[in-house]
Amino acid sequence: MSPRTLAVAAILAYLLDPVVDWLEHKQVPRTRAIILVFFVAVMLTPWLMLRLGQGKSHGHAHDRIGLLGRIYVAVARPILASRTRSSLFLAVVG
C-alpha cells in the first residue's frame, strides 16, 4: 500500500469516526454503522465532485479547476509548501 493511500485512509477514518460514534449512540451496532458510513461516503463523494466540480471554463487549463479543485489547492498548497510542513501534517493526523 502506498503512503499516499494510507494517509488518505487515515484522514477519512479520522473524519468519519464521529459519525460512526453518533450512529452507535443511536443503538446502531458499530459494524453496521461503519458499513453504512462507508457506503454513504462512496456514493456521496462522486456526486459532490460532479455537482461542485463543474466550473465555468474559457478554454484555459487553469480555468477548468472546479470548486473542489480550488478548495484542495487552497488547503494543500500551504501544507505541501515544505517537507517540514508535510511531515508535521502527517505526524498530527497519523
Image (cartoon, grey):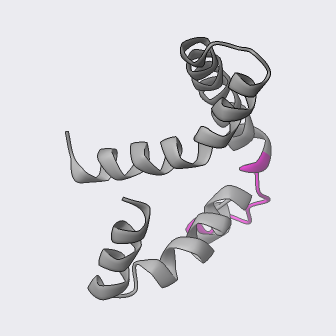
The stretch drawn in magenta includes residue 94? no
The stretch drawn in magenta includes residue 60? yes
Q: Please provide percent x and percent y for residue 4.
A: 30, 52
Would residue 94 appear left or right of 69 to someone viewing this image? Answer: left
Quadrant of res 91: bottom left
Magenta stretch: give its range: 52-61
Q: Is residue 79 above or below residue 57?
A: below
Q: Please provide percent x and percent y for residue 86.
A: 35, 77
| Magenta stretch: helix, strand or loop mostly | loop
In the foreground, 1 or 25 = 25
Q: What residue is at 42 percent from the left and 69 percent from the top?
A: 92
In the foreground, 70 or 65 = 70
Would residue 88 appear left or right of 32 to someone viewing this image? Answer: left
Q: What residue is at 73 percent from the left and 40 percent from the top?
A: 48
Q: Is residue 88 above or below residue 9?
A: below
Q: Please provide percent x and percent y for residue 64.
A: 65, 60
